[in-house]
Image (spheres, rainbow, N blue to C red):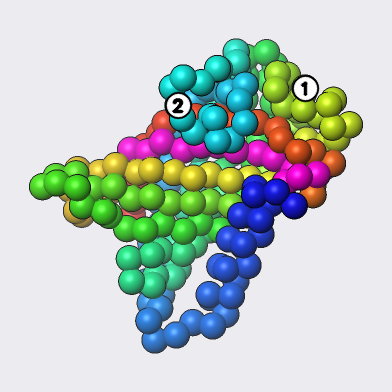
Amino acid sequence: MNIAARLSLTAMIALVATSSFASEDMTSETSEAIFGFAGAMTKEDMLKSAALIPVEYERNATIGGGYQFYPYRIGNVKLGGEIGIAARFGKGFTGEVWAGPVARYEQIRLGERLFITPSFTAGLSLVTDAQPGREREQEIKDDGNANVLFYLGPEINVSFSEDSSTEFFWRLHHRSGGGKTLGNMKGATNANVFGVRYKF
Protein backbone atom coordinates (compact mmCIF):
# COMPACT_ATOMS: atom_id res chain seq x y z
CA MET A 1 0.00 0.00 0.00
CA ASN A 2 1.55 3.33 -1.02
CA ILE A 3 1.49 6.74 0.64
CA ALA A 4 -1.84 7.84 -0.92
CA ALA A 5 -3.70 4.81 0.43
CA ARG A 6 -2.06 5.09 3.84
CA LEU A 7 -2.88 8.80 4.15
CA SER A 8 -6.50 8.24 3.10
CA LEU A 9 -7.06 5.36 5.51
CA THR A 10 -5.24 7.09 8.36
CA ALA A 11 -7.30 10.27 7.97
CA MET A 12 -10.61 8.41 7.84
CA ILE A 13 -9.74 6.21 10.84
CA ALA A 14 -8.47 9.22 12.81
CA LEU A 15 -11.69 11.17 12.32
CA VAL A 16 -13.86 8.23 13.38
CA ALA A 17 -11.67 7.49 16.39
CA THR A 18 -11.52 11.13 17.44
CA SER A 19 -15.29 11.61 17.32
CA SER A 20 -15.87 8.29 19.11
CA PHE A 21 -13.55 9.13 21.99
CA ALA A 22 -14.46 12.79 22.44
CA SER A 23 -12.85 14.29 25.54
CA GLU A 24 -13.10 17.51 27.50
CA ASP A 25 -10.59 19.06 25.09
CA MET A 26 -13.01 18.67 22.18
CA THR A 27 -15.75 21.18 21.50
CA SER A 28 -18.72 20.56 19.21
CA GLU A 29 -19.46 24.00 17.80
CA THR A 30 -20.36 23.28 14.16
CA SER A 31 -19.15 25.60 11.41
CA GLU A 32 -19.75 25.27 7.68
CA ALA A 33 -18.25 26.44 4.39
CA ILE A 34 -18.83 26.35 0.65
CA PHE A 35 -16.08 26.67 -1.94
CA GLY A 36 -15.39 26.80 -5.65
CA PHE A 37 -12.23 26.27 -7.67
CA ALA A 38 -10.72 25.93 -11.14
CA GLY A 39 -7.38 24.62 -12.32
CA ALA A 40 -5.33 22.53 -14.71
CA MET A 41 -4.52 18.82 -14.69
CA THR A 42 -0.88 17.78 -14.81
CA LYS A 43 1.14 15.06 -16.51
CA GLU A 44 3.15 14.52 -13.32
CA ASP A 45 2.87 12.41 -10.17
CA MET A 46 1.61 13.85 -6.88
CA LEU A 47 4.91 15.15 -5.51
CA LYS A 48 6.07 16.73 -8.77
CA SER A 49 2.64 18.31 -9.32
CA ALA A 50 2.79 20.03 -5.92
CA ALA A 51 5.81 22.03 -7.08
CA LEU A 52 3.44 24.15 -9.24
CA ILE A 53 6.31 25.46 -11.39
CA PRO A 54 7.94 23.89 -13.33
CA VAL A 55 5.21 21.32 -13.93
CA GLU A 56 4.15 19.84 -17.24
CA TYR A 57 0.42 20.36 -17.69
CA GLU A 58 -1.89 18.52 -20.06
CA ARG A 59 -4.72 20.00 -22.09
CA ASN A 60 -7.30 19.21 -19.43
CA ALA A 61 -8.91 21.53 -16.92
CA THR A 62 -11.21 21.05 -13.96
CA ILE A 63 -13.80 23.30 -12.33
CA GLY A 64 -15.83 22.44 -9.28
CA GLY A 65 -16.99 23.18 -5.79
CA GLY A 66 -18.08 21.66 -2.55
CA TYR A 67 -19.44 21.88 0.96
CA GLN A 68 -17.63 21.39 4.29
CA PHE A 69 -18.90 21.02 7.84
CA TYR A 70 -16.84 20.98 11.02
CA PRO A 71 -18.66 19.51 14.03
CA TYR A 72 -15.51 19.05 16.13
CA ARG A 73 -12.63 21.20 17.27
CA ILE A 74 -9.54 20.36 19.33
CA GLY A 75 -7.60 23.52 20.08
CA ASN A 76 -6.75 25.10 16.72
CA VAL A 77 -7.60 21.94 14.75
CA LYS A 78 -11.03 21.62 13.16
CA LEU A 79 -12.32 18.16 12.16
CA GLY A 80 -15.19 17.50 9.81
CA GLY A 81 -16.30 16.26 6.44
CA GLU A 82 -16.31 17.40 2.82
CA ILE A 83 -18.30 16.57 -0.29
CA GLY A 84 -17.57 17.98 -3.73
CA ILE A 85 -18.36 17.81 -7.42
CA ALA A 86 -16.28 18.76 -10.45
CA ALA A 87 -16.34 18.79 -14.24
CA ARG A 88 -13.20 17.77 -16.13
CA PHE A 89 -12.80 18.86 -19.71
CA GLY A 90 -10.31 19.47 -22.52
CA LYS A 91 -9.48 16.21 -24.28
CA GLY A 92 -12.87 14.91 -23.21
CA PHE A 93 -15.64 15.63 -20.69
CA THR A 94 -16.08 13.66 -17.46
CA GLY A 95 -17.63 14.29 -14.07
CA GLU A 96 -16.31 13.66 -10.56
CA VAL A 97 -17.76 13.50 -7.06
CA TRP A 98 -15.77 12.93 -3.87
CA ALA A 99 -16.33 12.80 -0.13
CA GLY A 100 -14.25 12.26 2.98
CA PRO A 101 -13.03 13.64 6.30
CA VAL A 102 -11.19 16.96 6.43
CA ALA A 103 -8.90 18.51 9.03
CA ARG A 104 -7.62 22.08 9.15
CA TYR A 105 -5.26 23.95 11.45
CA GLU A 106 -6.73 27.38 12.03
CA GLN A 107 -4.82 30.53 11.12
CA ILE A 108 -1.07 30.67 11.36
CA ARG A 109 -0.41 34.40 11.65
CA LEU A 110 2.39 35.63 9.39
CA GLY A 111 1.84 39.37 9.69
CA GLU A 112 -0.57 42.07 10.77
CA ARG A 113 -3.08 41.10 8.06
CA LEU A 114 -1.89 37.76 6.68
CA PHE A 115 -3.18 34.41 7.95
CA ILE A 116 -2.33 30.95 6.59
CA THR A 117 -4.48 27.87 7.23
CA PRO A 118 -3.30 24.43 6.05
CA SER A 119 -5.90 21.71 5.60
CA PHE A 120 -6.09 18.14 4.35
CA THR A 121 -8.97 16.14 2.87
CA ALA A 122 -8.84 12.36 2.33
CA GLY A 123 -11.58 10.11 1.05
CA LEU A 124 -13.00 8.46 -2.04
CA SER A 125 -13.51 9.87 -5.54
CA LEU A 126 -15.94 8.60 -8.18
CA VAL A 127 -15.79 9.61 -11.86
CA THR A 128 -18.10 8.96 -14.78
CA ASP A 129 -15.14 7.74 -16.87
CA ALA A 130 -11.36 7.99 -17.06
CA GLN A 131 -10.35 11.42 -18.35
CA PRO A 132 -8.45 11.20 -21.68
CA GLY A 133 -4.84 12.01 -20.88
CA ARG A 134 -2.77 10.80 -17.93
CA GLU A 135 -5.68 9.14 -16.15
CA ARG A 136 -6.68 7.05 -19.16
CA GLU A 137 -3.03 6.24 -19.88
CA GLN A 138 -2.52 5.02 -16.31
CA GLU A 139 -5.71 2.96 -16.55
CA ILE A 140 -4.41 1.21 -19.68
CA LYS A 141 -0.92 0.78 -18.21
CA ASP A 142 -2.22 -0.86 -15.01
CA ASP A 143 -5.09 -2.72 -16.72
CA GLY A 144 -7.22 -1.01 -14.10
CA ASN A 145 -10.44 0.91 -13.58
CA ALA A 146 -10.32 4.59 -12.56
CA ASN A 147 -14.00 4.88 -11.65
CA VAL A 148 -13.56 4.65 -7.85
CA LEU A 149 -10.22 5.73 -6.35
CA PHE A 150 -8.73 7.36 -3.27
CA TYR A 151 -8.96 11.15 -3.04
CA LEU A 152 -6.39 13.42 -1.39
CA GLY A 153 -6.60 17.20 -1.16
CA PRO A 154 -3.73 18.93 0.64
CA GLU A 155 -4.51 22.65 0.73
CA ILE A 156 -3.12 26.04 1.76
CA ASN A 157 -5.60 28.83 2.57
CA VAL A 158 -4.88 32.55 2.77
CA SER A 159 -7.02 35.20 4.47
CA PHE A 160 -6.39 38.84 5.32
CA SER A 161 -8.11 39.26 8.67
CA GLU A 162 -8.53 37.05 11.71
CA ASP A 163 -12.31 36.91 11.49
CA SER A 164 -12.69 36.96 7.69
CA SER A 165 -15.46 34.78 6.29
CA THR A 166 -13.69 34.63 2.91
CA GLU A 167 -10.40 32.93 2.11
CA PHE A 168 -8.44 32.01 -1.00
CA PHE A 169 -6.73 28.67 -1.48
CA TRP A 170 -4.49 26.41 -3.52
CA ARG A 171 -5.23 22.67 -3.48
CA LEU A 172 -3.59 19.65 -5.04
CA HIS A 173 -6.56 17.68 -6.36
CA HIS A 174 -5.30 14.07 -6.36
CA ARG A 175 -6.79 10.70 -7.35
CA SER A 176 -5.00 7.35 -7.18
CA GLY A 177 -5.56 3.69 -6.51
CA GLY A 178 -3.13 3.64 -3.60
CA GLY A 179 -0.68 1.10 -4.99
CA LYS A 180 -3.42 -0.95 -6.70
CA THR A 181 -5.56 -1.01 -3.55
CA LEU A 182 -8.52 0.35 -5.53
CA GLY A 183 -9.29 -0.26 -9.20
CA ASN A 184 -6.01 -2.13 -9.69
CA MET A 185 -4.53 1.35 -10.22
CA LYS A 186 -1.32 2.95 -8.97
CA GLY A 187 -1.61 6.59 -10.03
CA ALA A 188 -4.38 8.48 -11.83
CA THR A 189 -4.68 12.27 -11.92
CA ASN A 190 -3.35 15.40 -10.26
CA ALA A 191 -4.54 18.97 -10.72
CA ASN A 192 -3.36 22.26 -9.30
CA VAL A 193 -6.48 24.27 -8.50
CA PHE A 194 -7.10 27.72 -7.04
CA GLY A 195 -10.32 28.78 -5.40
CA VAL A 196 -12.29 30.80 -2.90
CA ARG A 197 -14.14 29.66 0.21
CA TYR A 198 -16.97 31.30 2.15
CA LYS A 199 -17.31 30.27 5.81
CA PHE A 200 -20.50 30.58 7.83
Report the side of 129 relative to 56 (left or right): right
- Queried whether the magenta region covers residue 179, the answer comes back as yes
* Residue type highlighted by circle 1: Glu
Helix, strand or loop under label 1: helix
| Residue 166 in view (yes/no) | no
Which numbered disc, 2 or 1, marks the residue that appears first in the sequence? 2
Please state the horizontal and vertical placement of residue 127, each as a whole percent of the image.
72, 35
Range of the magenta residues?
167-180
- Whole-percent x, y for residue 53 in the image: 43, 22
At x 57%, y 80%, the residue is 20
Q: Position of residue 199 (x, y in %)?
A: 34, 51
Residue at position x 10%, y 47% in the image? 112
Q: Relative to 200, is 42 on the left or the right?
A: right
Q: Which residue is mark 1?
A: 137
3D distance between C-alphas at marks 2 and 1: 22 Å
Residue drawn at (43%, 51%), measured in percent from left and top? 119
158 shown above or below 48: below
Judged from the image, the secondary structure of the residue bearing numbered disc 2 is: loop
Classed neighbour count for the residue bearing mark 2: other residues with Cα under 10 Å, few (<14), some (14–19), many (≥20): some
Q: Which residue reaches farthest right? A: 143
Q: Main secondary structure of the magenta part?
A: strand
Looking at the figure, which quarter contains the C terminus? bottom left
Above/below status of 172 relative to 108: above
Q: Is residue 4 above or below residue 20?
A: above
Q: Which residue is mark 2?
A: 52
Residue 71, horizontal then vertical, whole percent: 45, 68
In front of the other: 49 or 35 = 49
Q: Which label sits on residue 190?
A: none
Is residue 177 one of those drawn in magenta? yes
Q: Is residue 3 left or right of residue 137?
A: left
87 or 183, which is in the foreground? Answer: 183
The amino acid at mark 2 is: Leu
